[in-house]
């Protein structure tokens, strides 16, 4: 019995699949790179650069989705899960830092699993934003960032799925709890320091006023 014809057909199918895999790898690398650039630009307050980087990532995402449409296993194996996650994270961070509603998985066109892990990683970026705000003495923004972190952590904590459904979710939620606690401590200390400085300044002004009056 000859398998030559069957194997020839299989070979053509697998070659086409391998070619698509290479395209997905190229697209995913670009998504990850542009999404990372967007997050860096966001923290620098370079909104146009961030928006441009996300738009470029979106273009690569659409290319990847077109390839994946015929072979949807690429959604969950290979580099695409990370690319989806990085893209979701960049979009969520941009929205949260600018005080807007976070986009949904449907709006971003990413699987819900990658969206969840992207949101979890966005909590870490919000901690960075909170610390940057404290360095600028922008205590109101630091407090707002902390509230956003707490809300995201509370929402994620309510999700209870095994690793097989959402990889690394439990570990990321545990990390989020630590980040929220550390940020709460940092913000609390900064606010206490601010109150002490204000109290000292008031006391000094009072002494100066007393000297002038005498």
Image: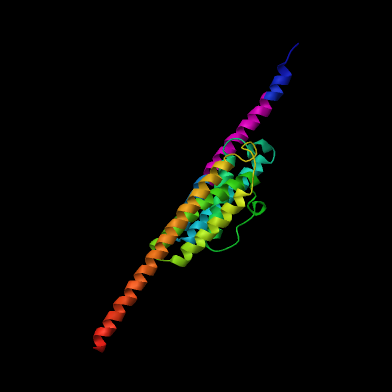
Q: Nearer the viewer, residue 1 or 105?
A: 105
Q: Is residue 20 above or below residue 34?
A: above
Q: Is residue 135 left or right of residue 1?
A: left
Give me the residue at 57% from left, 50% from top. 119
Q: Quadrant of residue 191?
A: bottom left
Question: What is the chief secondary structure element of the magenta stretch?
Answer: helix
Give the percent coordinates (x, y) of residue 190: 40, 62
Q: Quadrant of residue 211?
A: bottom left
Q: Nearer the viewer, residue 26 or 45?
A: 45
Q: How many marks?
A: 0
Give me the residue at 51% from left, 46% from top. 175
Residue 130 in sight here: yes
The quadrant of the picture occupied by the N terminus is: top right
Q: Quadrant of residue 165?
A: top right
Give me the residue at 35% from left, 72% from top. 199
Q: Nearer the viewer, residue 138 or 197?
A: 197
Q: Is residue 148 left or right of residue 108?
A: left
Residue placed farthest to the right in the image? 1
Q: Is residue 207 left or right of residue 111?
A: left
Q: Which region is colored magenta?
A: 11-31
Give the percent coordinates (x, y) of residue 214: 23, 88
Q: Is residue 188 above or below residue 159?
A: below
Q: Nearer the viewer, residue 110 or 214?
A: 214
Q: Is residue 62 above or below residue 96?
A: above
On whether residue 19 falls in the magenta region, the answer is yes
Give the percent coordinates (x, y) of residue 41: 46, 56
Residue 27 in sight here: no
């Amino acid at each position: 019995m000859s398998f030559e014809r069957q194997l020839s057909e299989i070979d053509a199918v697998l070659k086409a699949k391998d070619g698509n895999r290479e395209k997905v790898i190229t697209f995913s690398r670009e998504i990850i790179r542009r999404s990372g650039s967007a997050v860096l630009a966001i923290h620098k307050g370079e909104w146009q650069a961030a928006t441009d980087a996300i738009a470029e990532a979106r273009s690569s995402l659409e290319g990847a989705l077109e390839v994946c449409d015929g072979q949807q296993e690429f959604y969950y194996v290979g580099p695409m899960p990370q690319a989806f996650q990085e893209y979701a994270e960049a979009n969520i961070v941009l929205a949260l830092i600018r005080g807007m509603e976070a986009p949904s998985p449907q709006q971003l066109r990413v699987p819900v699993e990658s969206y969840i892990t992207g949101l979890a990683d966005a909590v870490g970026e919000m901690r960075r934003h909170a610390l940057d705000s404290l360095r600028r003495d922008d205590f109101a923004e630091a407090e707002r960032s902390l509230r956003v972190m707490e809300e995201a952590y509370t929402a994620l904590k309510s999700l209870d799925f095994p690793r097989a459904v959402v990889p690394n979710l439990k570990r990321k939620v545990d990390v989020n709890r630590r980040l929220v606690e550390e940020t709460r401590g940092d913000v609390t200390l900064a606010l206490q320091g601010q109150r002490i400085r204000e109290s000292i300044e008031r006391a000094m002004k009072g002494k100066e006023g007393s000297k002038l009056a005498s």
